[in-house]
Image (cartoon, rainbow, N blue to C red):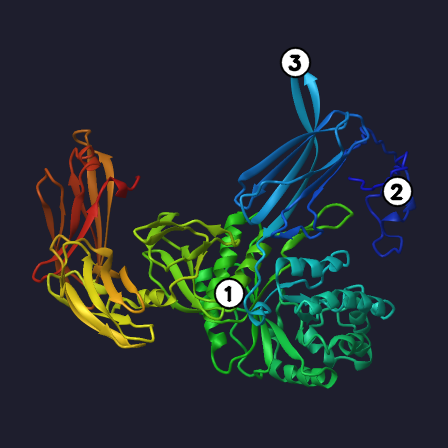
Amino acid sequence: MRLYGDYLNAAWIGMQFQLIQTQYDKDSLLGEHQVLFNEVDGDGQIDDIAIWQLPNIEICTQSKVNIIRAPIRPKLKVKVRDLSGRVLVSEVSIYDYRRQKISYKQQPVGAGSPNSWTLLPQLPGYGWYLADLVVSETQAIGGKTIKEPVARTLCSFLWLPDDRPYKVADAKLFGVSAVNLPENQLPLLPELVTKAGLYGVTLSPWRHDTTLKNITTQQNQLDKILQPLLSSSCEVTFAMAPLPDAMLSDLQQANLMAHTLFDQDENIWSAYFKPVILRHSQRVKRWVLGSANHPSAMFQKNLDSQMERTRKQFNALAPNPTLLLPWTALEPRHPYIKSDIGYVLKIPKGIRPQYMGEFLNEWKQSPQVEHVMLLDVETADVLSQQDRVTDLALRMLYGWEVTQSGMMIDKPWTISDRRKINLLPDPNLGVFAAMANRLSGRRVIKQLNLGRGLQCRILDGPAGGMLAMWNESAPDNRTQLTLYMGENPTWHDLWGNHQPMSVVDNKQQFTITREPSFIEDIDLELALLRASFHLNEPFIESRQLPHNRVVKLHNPWNQTVSGYLTFKEPAKWRITPKRIFFSMAANADYEIPVQLSFPISETAGDKNLVAQLQFSTQKNYDVQFQTPIQVGLKDIEFHSHLTIEPNPKTGEIDTIVTQRIANRGDKTISLYSFANMTGFPRQERLISRLHPGESILRNFRFRNSVELLKTQKIRTGLRETSGPAVLNHNLSAWDLVTP
């Protein structure tokens, strides 16, 4: 047990021990302290009692909420107070959100050294940091100095850039949920919201312990919280959770849902409700009818008629209230509730970012209703901090792309473990605030192809054009690109740090990782033209025939664009015409018919059609565009892989090619399967009459070939017995599958 206290004049610690009976009458008012006379005989022994006097240690920043905005730099205040006379040393280590140590400081304690001091850590940039203070006792044993840790404490803090959202109306859509916030944390909420740069907050007008005796006092406290929030243009929402225990007891409804409150005895609920609504409804217009963390109204029968009664009762008491019903994204919207009732949608942590559109699409359908997303985030004991902030940022991006509705996260902070309550911000608070700043005043208008597995969104609005980029499934965690994005674009990370970009041949170089990054001050029209470049049918059958396609472009400028387009890749393909002059009218679509042919040795799979565009608008451009294409056979599923194994007859190491062929069409087909390696005879086998839905395996063995595999590839594939279809794969040592 730990005894806290800052009592300078304390001289003694009193301890009292009780021997508790193992059984007692649970219905007795004395509880476990009752005495059962048939069990009074016995004895007890207590030994090995030790009392440790630990140093009083503390580490914090200059802010009670531990959020510092530039140009102010974070200062760490360290305090180590020890009365035992031991030789102590303190160590302060600072880590970033990737758990990389970026600062370390060791300081002796006592024996003439100060008991408190200030650190000015040299931080690499804006972000979330964790300060770890460990105090150890030093002893000289056998000529060596041994450090034995005796106390430890942690402090997290955010250092954020001094930027604000371009459009406050959008910024009010992003907020924190502080429902059922403990009384000791509530006074710090305005400073936290303001320092984080957020403009939305959801509060509880009551607490569990609210009674008719203390409700006036609690409303006075709430007034002190509301005043600085509202004066800073913050949008405040009241959540009717928790309902006061005393009111529920008087109503004899332990599990009452907030939206059914007005069906109960008015004499009881009005005594708790009217002091809140009469006092605050002129300033607070939005009300959540319950807890968004525990939505359950969707399972209630006759919910539409219930909500109609609730709406009428609210309108009779408050001027123009906005009512929001707790809901979950796993359930469809209610078909009969009127559109003037909104929703708070809980987005479970199990919904991956790229699938959010499937759950949110119906919420933008007519009739549109107001909806706010409560993003449920994973805890740090399940995901690393880096994965947590990446997941949150992607969920915000995907959600904003589908529906530009409100978003909030629940209490993204913890508290210090001392009696002096300080709020310790979570990394998600910093990323949420930074993302809110990036998205405010912008909308997703287009997707831009940057390569397989890479995602890019073009955003535009009053705040200006911007690219949001991340690596979703590309095998390389760090993909470097070289593109011309404008005369002077700026690249930012998740926290708002400006990242340097090198320039090669008037093109910017930047790296895309799993974490989203952003490029602002872009040439927006060029980005839109680049995004419009695509084939009408990107899938190309692997048949030795000319393939007719149409290359499509859109001119985003308000003037005619003319120039030349020259196809560069895929290499060895014949593209007709190879070079073409084009002239596009202002804000018009343009189509270029082309004919594509590829050599018989072309492998199946994903490729890029690359073109060089030289054109003029207000200035001259010479840029490369690309669009994905895929070569394959629609009705045939083909997979191949390599294994190695000892030859049972010779003991040599052989290479085995395994093919899996499946007929996904509606006609019976006949094929030749083959595998070829330099230095070995070509191997080919007939697959006769493969029926629809059937699959088959074919194996090819190359004896004693493992050394050759280090420098050679194996070509394997299929060809029609009577037709132009040929499907090729190349396999190398990198494709080996371990048995």
Q: Position of residue 670 (x, y in %)?
A: 12, 60
Along the polypeptide, which appears first: circle 1 or circle 3? 3
Q: Position of residue 68 (x, y in %)?
A: 64, 51
Amino acid carrying label 1: it is Leu
Does residue 549 appear in this view? no
* Tag 3 residue: 143
Residue closest to the eye, 592 or 391 = 592
Amino acid carrying label 3: it is Gly
Residue 2 lies left or right of residue 655; in this view the side is right
Q: Position of residue 362 (x, y in %)?
A: 47, 75
Dot 2 lies on which element?
helix
Residue 488 lies left or right of residue 173; in this view the side is left
Nearest to the eye among marks 1 and 3: give it. 1
Nearest to the eye among marks 2 and 3: give it. 3
Residue closest to the eye, 14 or 621 = 621
Q: Tell me the quarter of the image containing the C terminus.
A: top left
Label 1, label 2: how many angstroms apart (C-alpha)? 69 Å
* Tag 1 residue: 439
